[in-house]
Image: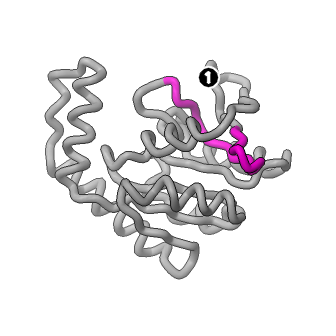
């Protein structure tokens, strides 16, 4: 199963994956030539189910935002599936949030779309930037965030009927994804 977590900047995608990682035990990392950090990390839940997360989470913005190309992210996912032993691969990040073509061809794809008010996303980005010490960048143009949200909404709408789409708020997302992995 391939789970693509989608939402605009500040929706809570990275925070959600970190919470999933904390609920599990890291059992291996995937290193790739030319990368200093892992291309993926593999975790085991107490139930024995195993999932991998694409990218690394050593920086404030983790996941696929630590991978330079969309094609690389999907290539890493395929390598993980080819090796076997993983029940789910989880991806998140702005780099893949608008993708439509590749997700349709992924293994048993699910979109988990974190749909929250744009004001909450704006506040999430502001807090993240302040935490990083980027005071001058803390205020982002609302139009930029709104444009990202429109693009992601459009991609999710086009995918409905082609892949499994689950729309959630921040509070529901963790339980929904955990249930997907556990019941796969």
Q: Quadrant of residue 130?
A: top left
Q: Quadrant of residue 108?
A: bottom right
Q: For the view shown, which residue lies furthest in the bottom direction?
A: 161
Does 54 appear above or below 174? above
Q: Secondary structure at mark 1?
A: loop
For the point 24% across and 56% down, which residue is it?
147
For the point 15% across and 48% down, which residue is it?
142
Residue identified by numbered label 1: 37
**Residue 51: in magenta span:** yes
Count of numbered badges drawn on the protein: 1
**Residue 142: in magenta span:** no
Q: Position of residue 49 (x, y in %)?
A: 74, 50
Q: Position of residue 88 (x, y in %)?
A: 69, 54
Does 67 appear above or below 81? above
Q: Position of residue 134 (x, y in %)?
A: 23, 21
Residue range in magenta is: 43-58
Does 61 appear above or below 114? above
Does 173 appear above or below 65? below
For label 1, the crowd category at 10 Å Cα-Cα, with few meaning under 14, some 14 to 19 and many 20 or more, is some
Q: Is residue 144 left or right of residue 68?
A: left
Instruction: Assign the N terminus to one quadrant of the image.
Output: bottom right
Q: For the view shown, which residue lies furthest in the front direction?
A: 46
Q: 51 or 56, which is in the foreground?
A: 51
For the point 72% across and 27% down, which residue is it?
31
Q: Is residue 50 left or right of residue 74?
A: right
């Amino acid at each position: 199963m391939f789970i693509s977590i989608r939402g605009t900047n500040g929706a809570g995608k990275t925070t959600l994956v970190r919470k999933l990682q904390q609920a599990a035990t890291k059992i291996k990392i995937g290193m790739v030539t030319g990368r200093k950090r892992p291309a993926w990390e593999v975790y085991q839940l107490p139930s024995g189910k195993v999932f991998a997360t694409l990218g690394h989470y050593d920086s404030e913005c983790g996941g696929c935002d630590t991978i330079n190309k969309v094609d690389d992210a999907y290539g890493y996912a395929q390598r993980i599936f080819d090796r076997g032993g993983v029940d789910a691969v989880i991806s998140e990040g702005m780099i893949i949030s608008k993708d439509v073509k590749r997700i349709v061809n992924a293994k048993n794809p699910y979109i988990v779309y974190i749909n929250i008010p744009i004001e909450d996303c704006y506040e999430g980005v502001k807090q993240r930037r302040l935490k990083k010490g980027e005071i001058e960048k803390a205020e982002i143009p609302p139009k930029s965030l709104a444009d990202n949200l429109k693009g992601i909404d459009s991609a999710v709408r086009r995918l409905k009927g082609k892949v499994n789409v689950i729309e959630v708020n921040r509070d529901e997302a963790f339980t929904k994804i955990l249930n997907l992995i556990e019941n796969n």
